[in-house]
Image (cartoon, grey):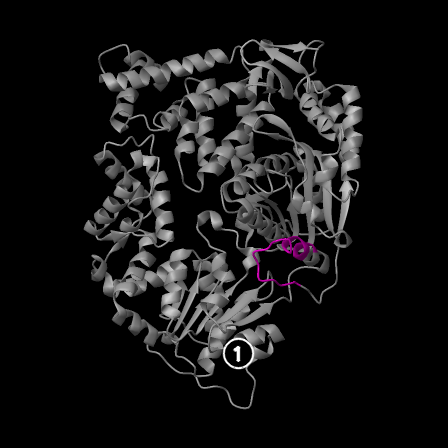
Amino acid sequence: MSDFALAPIPHEEPTYLNKLNPAQRAAVEALDGPVLVLAGAGTGKTRVLTARLVHLLMTGKAMPGQVLAVTFTNKAAGEVRNRVGHMLGRSVEGWFLGTFHALAARLLRPHAELVGLKPNFTILDDDDQTRLIKQLLEAENIDDKKSPARALLAVISRWKDRGLLPHDVAHEKSQLADGKVPKIYAAYQQRLLELNACDFGDLLLHHLTILRKHPDILAELHNRFRYILVDEYQDTNTVQYLWLRLLAQERKNICCVGDEDQSIYGWRGAEVGNILRFEEDFPGATVVRLEENYRSTGHILASASHVIANNSMRLGKTLWTSADMGDPVRVESLWDGEEEARWVADEVETQQRKQTSLNEIAVMVRAGFQTRAFEERFIQLGIPYRVLVGARFYERAEIRDAMAYMRLLNSPDDDLAFERIINTPKRGIGPAAIQQLNIFAKSQRISLLESATRLVETDELKPKLRQTLRVFAENFARWRGLLQNIPHAEVAQIVLDDSGYTGMWQLDKSPEAPGRLDNLKELISAMAEFDTLPAFLEHVSLVLEATSSNEAEQVSLMTLHGAKGLEFDIVFLPGWEEDIFPSRRSIDENGTAGLEEERRLAYVGITRAKKRAFISHVANRLLYGSWVNALPSRFLEELPEPHIIRHSAIGNSANAGMRASSSRGWGDEPRREKIAPLWQQIQAGQPSFAKASEAKGASRLIEGRATVVATPRREGEPNIGDRVTHEKFGTGIVRRVDHDKLEVAFEKKGVLKVMAGFVKVVS
């Protein structure tokens, strides 16, 4: 498509300008020189991007081929493309408008030979990349089980995101692959060249290499692109940042639109510092703040602004709206996670009775494993729902794998379960071996597991395969025996650990692996709520059947990371408790930077709501099979009192919850009477939740909940705070009780988990 110039319209202001507010218009009309548009949530960012692009063309500043417009997603690129095409009344196909990867690939192909590729190079998908890494591991005699290919790919991808070539990381240390990750990176890159292929990380990295080594090509692009537009600049990683700086260094006509308060992807390489130092990178830059919000009510915006103001790594803006204040943000204090799920579901039904479409209601959680409780409650009440950005809990790959182990444990005749897990994790059992098992099973009319059990006693199989199958079959026999004496949830954990399935994900260094491990822990918690393994398996089958819904209206369930860019009339934000939100892992790994990114997630969550925002937290939560006493999130303290309304259901729900749960052995009336009023006191508008919960005596009483919910204690049995002695570990204080397992702080050995039967209470 040939470039064309559009002359400005004389004597009449274009409609795309007169629809803008003053700040938006300033961002559109500041065409020359570096411009940073700080676009708060719901302030019309896309309108500014499209109007600015059109304005460049209508004023004759540039022709279509002279503008480089970069987005992060194909969806965003499509939206800009459609809006600009509509405003101009013509197609924009062929323009340099697209994602980082799409534009880098397009610019790389004409010069591919400079990095050892041909112009028709292919781009490998994840499966091809993994297969290639596996081949390289095999060549180095490295065990793929101990150093999974996916883990190595994650490390290599991070290096590419940082703009690092193999020689840049030659001396990097890693426990993976016997310390040979840099060597494998180099071999991987060489093999890609031999295949005339690259992965997505190479697209920018190769083009950046060309621009650095060939000034003439860089000069050509400087001459071609008079203006650069960048969307979601706060999410750029290092290689994207370096690429943009090179392209913009000559003319400096770069406009970056973003919001440092919505930078929430640090875990996948995004550098919030890129947007924070824009004025240092481009001295004299114009900074325009878009602060008028067109999405949310005044109370919602004030709450979000008050929370995010506690971050230090920000350039600063305060959202406001000309709309009314609306309803205050509601903060609900509840007894436990089960009560929280009931409360959310009840509120959803209340909103539905008020004629709110289910499509306008969303539940946003910090971590994927938290969706399970809400999914099950919605199913129980017949509330249609969808899980956005990810599968429903019981449909996730790791849960289906774990469930296959449980199914085979419960029913040795379940051949489908056998086939799913026989080589997961990898045991060297390929299609040929499985075919051999199938042939024998059909001839004898027995199950695959029985087939394996019998064949290992013959010479039909190779010795190594025979030993692998023998261990597999013996493990299932042993695990099935454990079910006679040990609770099924504990056996399930043993199965996942002994089979190597948990270890497989622990070794996986990909960004998704921690979430998968959390999901597996949540599965164990779910199993503990049922009396038997068969009862749980039947429940899951019914859940999966009930979730096959084609309802037109559905509540949306999602993580906060997946919620960015979306908006709903009603938003529920459950689980605002320390260690869950903010995430303990994030803070442990990244310190203050991690905490600030967690706070940005809170800001994103609140600003998804248009009319009503509900935030909730609980006093007690069943996490990974054990009850923990949950402290309210520090973010709750940062909410502005004039814009929120706090309500505590802990007194009522504690008593009701304990009555309802007494059949499960939660009893202990005196302790119940102490705990409920304490939590009422803590939640009744105290100036500091954290300080209140740490008041003298509060910790001991709250921790007593672990005893209450675990099991009634008989006289002489250890309890929270008791001094006990252990034959091997010495003397210590009981910190937590979970059925017959204790967590004890020993004087000489530190905190250890022991069985109650191995300690004695001492005075």
Question: Is 352 on the left-hand or right-hand side of 263?
Answer: right
Q: Is residue 464 above or below residue 598?
A: above
Q: Is residue 646 above or below residue 4?
A: above
Q: Is residue 326 above or below residue 623?
A: below
In the rendered image, is residue 445 in sight?
no
Q: Quadrant of the N terminus?
A: bottom left
- Residue 446 drawn at (x, y percent): 35, 15
The span picked out in magenta is 303-319
Residue sitting at 60 percent across and 42 percent down? 581
Tag 1 residue: 29
- Residue 197 drawn at (x, y percent): 25, 52
Q: Is-magenta flag for residue 318?
A: yes
- Residue 272 drawn at (x, y percent): 50, 56
Question: Is 161 on the left-hand or right-hand side of 559?
Answer: left
- Residue 325 drawn at (x, y percent): 75, 60
Which residue reaches farthest front? 748
The kind of residue tagged 1 is Glu
Residue sitting at 66 percent across and 44 percent down? 634
| Along the viewing direction, whichever of 563 and 415 lies nearer the viewer | 563
Which residue reaches farthest bottom? 11
Q: Quadrant of the C terminus?
A: top right
Residue sitting at 69 percent across and 47 percent down? 614
In the rendered image, is residue 356 in sight?
yes
Q: Is-magenta flag for residue 519?
A: no
Say which quarter of the image contains residue 617.
top right
| Along the viewing direction, whichever of 742 and 467 lies nearer the viewer | 742
Circle 1: element type: helix
Say which quarter of the image contains residue 737.
top right
| Along the viewing direction, whichever of 151 and 119 lies nearer the viewer | 151
Q: Main secondary structure of the magenta part?
A: loop
